[in-house]
Image (cartoon, rainbow, N blue to C red):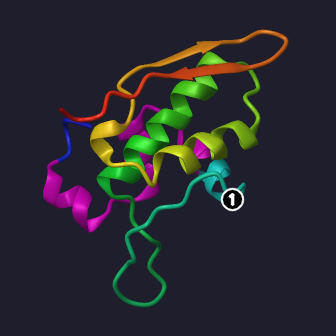
Amino acid sequence: MTTMNTDVLQRGVSTLVAAREAGVTFRQADYWVRAGVIAPTVEARGSGNARGWCEDDVALLKVCGTIASALERAPVSLLAAAVDLLRPLPRTWWPELLELAPSDHVTVTVRIRPPA
């Protein structure tokens, strides 16, 4: 997400731009929005405009992409649980690295380092 300036991300970017910044496809992002996994949170101005994706939304979209790429056929319930777990936490507590171990049972280890 280093290519977007903070001001643009605070105003909100389109799903296409958010997907590109998060390293996922537009179709993945659109599917996850329709499935209720994640939703952009920036209210658009004017009628008929779609909502925008802020910096935190794009970061959560990237988490979903990381899980989906590491686990073949990751259930949307797992992606939704990750979003639900992270969204209320301070951004500084969000993981920089997800360790994923697919097996008969999916185990997701998230190491969160609270700020000093």
Q: Is residue 50 above or below residue 35?
A: below
* Quadrant assignment for the C terminus: top left
Q: Please name whichever residue, 65 or 16, is drawn nearer the observer in this view of the structure.
A: 65
Using the image, determine if residue 87 lies above or below residue 12.
above
Q: Quadrant of residue 67?
A: top right
Q: Residue furthest right?
A: 104
Q: Is residue 116 left or right of residue 75?
A: left
Residue at x 34% of width, y 84% of height: 45
Residue 7 in percent (x, y) is at 14, 60
Which quadrant holds the N terminus?
Answer: top left
Choose between 57 and 3: the one closer to the eye. Answer: 57
Residue receiving disc 1: 34
Q: Position of residue 87 (x, y in %)?
A: 46, 52
Q: Position of residue 53 (x, y in %)?
A: 39, 59
Q: Which residue type does callout 1 highlight?
A: Arg
Residue name at image x 37 percent, y 70 percent: 42
Task: Decide whether residue 99 is among the magenta residues.
Answer: no
Above or below, comparing residue 78 to residue 18 in the picture: above
Q: Write down the region rendered in magenta.
A: 5-29
| 19 left or right of 27 in image | left
At horizontal 44% and vertical 71% (from top left) the residue drawn is 51
Residue placed at 54% from the left, 60% from the top?
A: 39
* Res 109 seen here: yes
Which residue, as the protein is rendered here, is positioned at the far front? 116
Q: Position of residue 80 (x, y in %)?
A: 65, 46
In this rendered view, identify the residue nearer to me: 53 or 15: 53
